[in-house]
Image: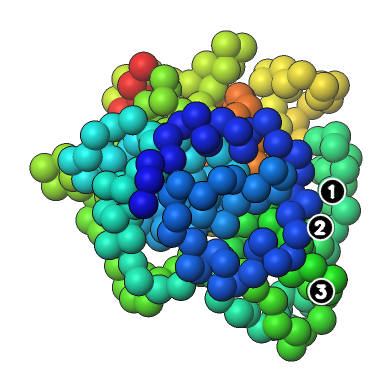
Amino acid sequence: MGVWVRVAFSVLCMTGGLAAAAQDLTIEAVNNAADLSAKPPEKGANPLLIKTQVLLDRARFSPGVIDGRDGENLQNAIKAFEKAGGLHVDGALDDELWAKLNETSSDPVLVPYTITDDDVKGPFTTIPDKMEAQAKLKRLSYSSPEELLSEKFHMDIDLLKALNPGRRFDEAGASIVVANVAPAGAAQDKPEIERIEVVKSEKVLRVLGKDGVVLAVYPASIGSEEKPAPTGSHTVRAVAPRPSYTYNPDYAFKGVKAKEKFEIKPGPNNPVGSTWIDLSIESFGIHGTPEPEKVGKAYSNGCVRLTNWDVEELAGMVKKGTPIAFLD
C-alpha cells in the first residue's frame, strides 16, 4: 500500500456535496476499504475516510460527526491517536497509522440496522431559530427520524441518506445501513479517569487516566473572543442529563432581545444539547449541542461544547470532583 498524505486529504475538502453514487458507498466498499493509494472520489464521501472515522470513534478518539470527509476534527483525532500510540505525529493516513488503527477493532464499520418503533414514534418538533421562540415549546425533541438516527450512529444526515439511497427512515421494521460505532463489549468498558484537559489551541478535550494515559479525545468548541472560556484548574460539580436551559439577559447573546430570564425545555435540540456537566466555576459547563456538525468549527458562548454523543460518553466517566484544567 502507498501513502496517502495530507495533500490527498485536502482534495476532499475542495469537492462538492455528498452526492456519491450508491455503488461507491456500498457496505462492502466501506468495510473493505484499505487502499491508501486509491484516488479519492471527485465528490461525496470517501469510503476510506468513513472507515477511518468509525475506527477512531470506537477507539474514543472522536472525529466528531462521521461524514466521510477530511477536516480539522479528523486531523486532530488522527494526531491524538498517533501521539497516544507513540507514532510519528503528522495527521497523515499512512501505512503505520492504518495498521495501528485496524488493531483497535475487527468489527465491521458499517452494519445493517432495523428501524425500531422508538426510532419513529416521536414526537418530533420543528425547531425555530430564535431562542425566545424555542422557550414556547414543550420540548426540544429531534426534528425527524433522520436526525434521531444520524445522532444515534454519530453520522451526518447527508451521509446516512447517501448510504441508504431511496430508503425511508420513518418506517419501523425497515432495514438501513449505519455506522457501527459501538463495538462488542463497549457498554461495560467504563475507564477510571484522573483528570480532563481542555486544550484551547487544539480545540479538543482530553480525558486522562492513571499516569497520564489518554483515554479519550473529543473535538470541542471552546469559547470565543466575546465570551472566552475559563482559565486555570477547576472540578466537575455535577452531571445533569436532559437539562433545561435558562437564558439570563446578562449573557447578552447576539440576536436575543429578551430583557428578562426565560427557560427552554429539555431535549437534544436544547441550546446545551442532551447533557450538561456542571463545573465549579459559576455558569460554565461542558455540554452538548443541537448542531453537532459545527463542533470544533464554530465558537461557543464561553462553555465547552461537544457533540451530544461525546458529552454523554464523557458524562458516564466523570464524577463529582473530577479535576479539569483549561490549557491555552
> Mark 1: which amino acid?
Ile
* Residue indicated by mark 3: 167
Where on the picture, by quarter, is residue 297? top right
Label count reads: 3
Which residue corresponds to the image point at 81% horizontal and 35% vertical from the top-left? 131
Q: Is residue 293 visible?
A: yes
* Dot in front, 2 or 3: 3
Residue 13 relative to residue 8: left or right:
right
Q: Are marks 2 and 3 in contact (CB under 8 Å)?
A: no
**Separation of disc 3 and disc 1 at Cα?**
24 Å
Q: Are marks 2 and 1 in contact (CB under 8 Å)?
A: yes
SS assignment at label 3: loop
* Residue indicated by mark 1: 127
SS assignment at label 2: loop
Residue 67 in the image, given as x and y percentages of width and height? 62, 50
Q: Are marks 3 and 1 in contact (CB under 8 Å)?
A: no
* Residue indicated by mark 2: 143
